[in-house]
Amino acid sequence: MKKISILSLSLVMAMGSMFTSCEAVKNTNNTQRGAGIGAAGGAVLGAILGNNLGKGGNGAVGAVLGGVVGGVAGGVIGNKMDKQARQIDEAIPGAEVERVGEGIKLVLNENAVRFDTSKSTLTAAAKANLDKLIPVFQEYAETNITIFGYTDSTGPADFNLKLSGERAASVRNYLISKGLNTGRFTVTGMGIADPIASNETTSGRAENRRVEFAITANEKMLQEAQQEAGQ
């Protein structure tokens, strides 16, 4: 993967009592970090992270970290997420794939998912890229997926908020039309919130027009992980 998030790890490292050294943390993989979070009380830490990290905790990072389980079960889930993240990265090389906590943050910019101007209609190229995700989402069916739509700051904020929600819904509806379970999806329009680049430049506005996915364990995966962990 091109980018591995260290947001959750950074906060865990600050809790010195959890680990004997920073080097010990660096040498862990995502699965081991998932288990390590449990030593600090995974659910509590997850709530703290979800409310404070990742552009105000409102986007995909907040959604993923807000559901941290921790402990051995968290490590089991982390292992499954490692595999899924690698497959997503291979399916769409231009996507930004981040393993965060016990979930995945996926960012598709407008080069991957483009809409008609000021509309929520997916272009043919966007559909083709979403098609590449479907086999991965089918293989890892025991996950929930929250889709966040974003716009740049051009135009009225209320229009952009509505448009971003409609675009997120268009992505969800397309994936459902290809056979994915509707119950797995939640959509949220973020409008002009949480810009990742300057809205003062053409290239920056293009970066801000994006769709983010927060991929987390569903209840079945959680229960199976707890059983495997002997909890």
Image (cartoon, helix red, strand yellow):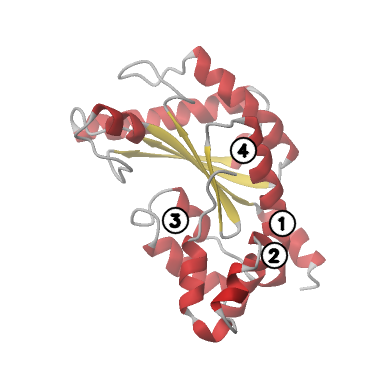
Which residue was labeled with disc 3?
62
Mark linked to residue 89: 4
Nearer to us in this view, 119 or 220: 119
Q: Earlier in the sequence, mark 1 or mark 3?
A: 3
Q: In the rendered image, which quarter contains the N terminus?
A: top right
Q: Nearer the viewer, mark 4 or mark 3?
A: 4
Q: Nearer the viewer, mark 1 or mark 4?
A: 4
User: Measured along the vertical axis of the image, is residue 129 above or below residue 28?
Assistant: above
Q: Earlier in the sequence, mark 2 or mark 3?
A: 3
Seen at 37% across and 64% down, the residue is 52
Q: CA distance from mark 1 to mark 4?
A: 16 Å
Q: Earlier in the sequence, mark 2 or mark 4?
A: 2
Q: Nearer the viewer, mark 2 or mark 3?
A: 2
Seen at 66% across and 70% down, the residue is 35
User: Measured along the vertical axis of the image, is residue 54 above or below residue 163?
Assistant: below
Which residue was labeled with disc 1?
79
Which residue was labeled with disc 2?
75
Compared across the picture, whether 219 is left or right of 161 comes to: right
* Residue furthest to the front: 23
